[in-house]
Amino acid sequence: MKHGHDDEPPRIVVRVDGFESSKAALRWAIHQAKLTGAVVDAVTAWQVPVSTGWIPVADTPDYQQDAFTVLAEAIAEMCTVDPDVQVCPRVVEGRAGQVLVDASEGADLLVVGSRGHGGLGEALLGSVGQYCVHHAHCPVLIIRGQPGQVARAA
């Protein structure tokens, strides 16, 4: 893997969104990092849904905290794959595609999970993956998920 500065290890950015395909992507990134000496940036994007409208402050969900929880749980589960690999959690506000493209700046690889939808839908790339393939600053690897597939740590 190429990397920008001689004193920095290679960097793999991976999207984590709580779905099994993203856990598979994180597991793959950790395995690849072990082989290449890379660090893994595990990125979760969040934003307030447009349809939220007016909600009393006391009832407003903490989207950032929810995103951090999803990321922390996925890292805890997948880091058993290889606990020696450095995984850096990043929770960023914004649209997932743009957050990942921004994170790909200076990275060696961007890994994104894609959920299978069955039939013809499986041939289509999700909107975030599609955006990343066209705009990322590094190569993009799409990890295909299967409906109902359970991510395993081993």
Image (cartoon, helix red, strand yellow):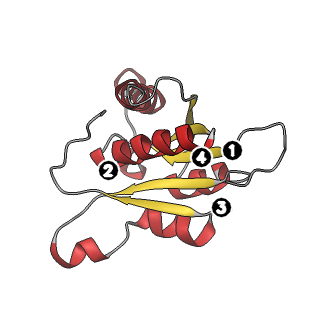
Tag on residue 141? none
**Residue bearing the label numbered 1:** 10
Mark 2 residue crowding within 10 angstroms, few (<14) / some (14–19) / many (20+): many
- Residue at the image position 78 percent from the left and 38 percent from the top: 8
Judge depth for marks 2 and 4 and give the one in front: 4
In the rendered structure, find residue 12 and report the number of the disc placed on it.
4
Q: Which residue is label 3 attached to?
A: 138
Q: In the rendering, at what x and y percent does residue 110 appear?
A: 56, 54
Quadrant of the rendering where the N terminus is positioned: bottom right
* Mark 1 nearby-residue class (10 Å; few <14, some 14–19, many ≥20): many
Which residue corresponds to mark 2? 21
Q: Are marks 3 and 1 in contact (CB under 8 Å)?
A: no
Gap between marks 4 and 3 measured at Cα: 10 Å
* Residue at left offset 30%, top offset 45%: 19
**Mark pair 3, 1: CA separation:** 12 Å
N-terminal label among 3 and 2: 2
Q: Position of residue 50 (x, y in %)?
A: 42, 51
Tell which tag, 3 or 1, sits nearer the viewer: 1
The residues tagged by marks 2 and 4 sit, at their Cα atoms, a distance apart of 17 Å
Q: Of 92 and 111, which appears nearest the observer?
A: 111
Element assignment for label 1: loop
| Pointers 3 and 2 in contact (C-beta within 8 Å) | no
Q: Amino acid at mark 1?
A: Pro
Question: Is residue 47 in sight in this rendering?
Answer: no
Marks 1 and 4 in Cβ contact (< 8 Å): yes
